[in-house]
Amino acid sequence: MAFLEVNNIKKSFGRTEVLKNISFSLEKGEVLAIIGSSGSGKTTLLRCINFLEAPQKGIISVGGEVLFDGDDPSKKKEKEIRKNRLHFGMVFQQFNLFPQYTVFENLILAPQLMAKEQIKANGEYMEAKTYKEAQEKIRAEADRLLKKVGLTEKKDSYPCDLSGGQQQRVAIARALALNPDVLCFDEPTSALDPELTGEVLNVIKGLKSTDSTMIVVTHEIGFARDVADKIIFMDNGVIEEEGTPQEVIENPKSRRTREFLSRFNQFGD
Amino acid sequence: MEQFWNVTLQLLEGFTQNCALFGVTLLAALPLGLIISFGSMSRFIPLKAVCRTFVWIIRGTPLLLQLFVVYYIPPMMTNGSFRFGDRMSAAMIAFIINYAAYFSEIYRGGIESIPKGQYEAGYVLGMTKSQIFFKVVLLQVIKRIIPPMSNEIITLVKDTSLARIILVEEILKFADDFRVQGLIWPVFYTGVFFLLFCGALTLLFRFIERKLDYYKG
């Protein structure tokens, strides 16, 4: 069984079927790129994986643990959904940083809330020292992540004072702060000026390692080819083609994939 | 000159009533308005309908009429066995209800103007709904609603003089008593009290706005 298993996901909005039986799997440490034209269902798929949308049908499991089963009639409690979400991290197209917090505060907010909640749930009156240690650990981790995305010197800036590329790098660090099993990117460079996409793509490339599993929805075909281990081309709610970058981008079998890619090649990408 | 000080002291005494009405209304209507705004945004249709109807009725009728209703209807309905202890309490109830309705709409506008992405960012970071509201959304809402809120709160200062319609002893009631005795200028003099109070509020709101100016968005 693969690390991430997505089976037969179906999602409709009203009468519009957006995802028709999507299945794929991903091994730990693999990078999956999802490409396809607008409206093909890429973003909805990513949102279903992050439990921002509930599919009507299908199964999602990580590391053998079933996190979502469309046939399970019991309604999941908010608490359970929250716990499941923590397996995944998400970087949005529009960054969605919290504007009233500094870069550093954006990173530590969720881990701090989580730590506080844990203390409460355990019913322990944590000693001041232990509490301090937990706080220090969160802060040290935030510092490490900011260094990783190259924004240590922007630590105390507010999001409004950063460029789009910098904001997106903060968003990546923020998603990493909770140490998710699978990090998802929803068109992370689509809202950026062309000259800023490079810095964000380089950061994502830099995250690639043996134990970070990533799913990137992107229009950057060159990036997908260089970084992904696996590419899915989606069209009209189905997986039209999937395989290695060589298979999908260099030698596409499906006519729809060829048509889609030829539009990019026209501009020499 | 002695007359001037006499009148000033009398009007000041009346104005403390206006201030009390203002303060109590603000303290109670601000949280109550927030609760009503949640109701009118609820996905539970009956609750939403009740809240929206309430807002429609309150905003659709004059505050003056609402003062009469709160003061006269309870004793009429209970054959005189229940009435608000004093005129001031009745005025406070009417003002709180009225202003909570207006505030609720300002809150609703502010809350609904926050991009969905802020909530989603909170969700994917494993935050609860209430954590998202209090830690992420609320300050942004406050920043956005300060201008319309200050408008409404300044209106409240002047509206307090409407309480004289049920004979609350507020500043204009005192001034009018002078007028009846043949002394007209105290009526115009009351304007100074309102101007000073509203001026102070304007400065306060400007200060808060500047305090929240450290970020954009």
Image (cartoon, grey):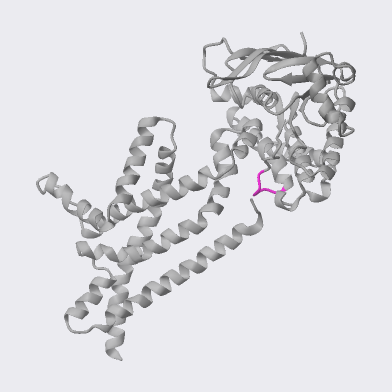
Q: Is residue A189 above or below residue A161?
A: above
Front residue (pair A263, B184): A263
Rendered location of residue A245, percent (x, y): 87, 20
Residue A100 forms part of the magenta stretch: yes
Q: Residue sitting at 52 percent across and 17 percent down? A: A75
Residue B83 forms part of the magenta stretch: no
Number of on-image labels: 0
The quarter of the image holding the N terminus of chain B is bottom left
Let me know if residue B148 appears in the view.
yes
- Asked whether, in this view, residue B137 is left or right of residue B97, the answer is right
Let me know if residue A4 appears in the view.
no
Magenta stretch, main secondary structure class: loop
Q: Which residues are magenta?
A: A98-102
- Asked whether, in this view, residue B136 is left or right of residue A211, the answer is left
Q: Is residue B183 above or below residue B155?
A: below
Rendered location of residue B205, percent (x, y): 51, 63
Front residue (pair A44, A140): A44
Front residue (pair A257, A9): A257
Rendered location of residue B13, percent (x, y): 29, 73
Q: Quadrant of residue A63?
A: top right
Q: Residue sitting at 35 percent across and 35 percent down? A: B49
Q: Residue sitting at 90 percent across and 33 percent down? A: A268
Rendered location of residue A153, percent (x, y): 83, 50
Front residue (pair B7, A127): B7
Q: Residue furthest top?
A: A1
Q: Residue furthest left?
A: B79
Q: Quadrant of residue B24?
A: bottom left
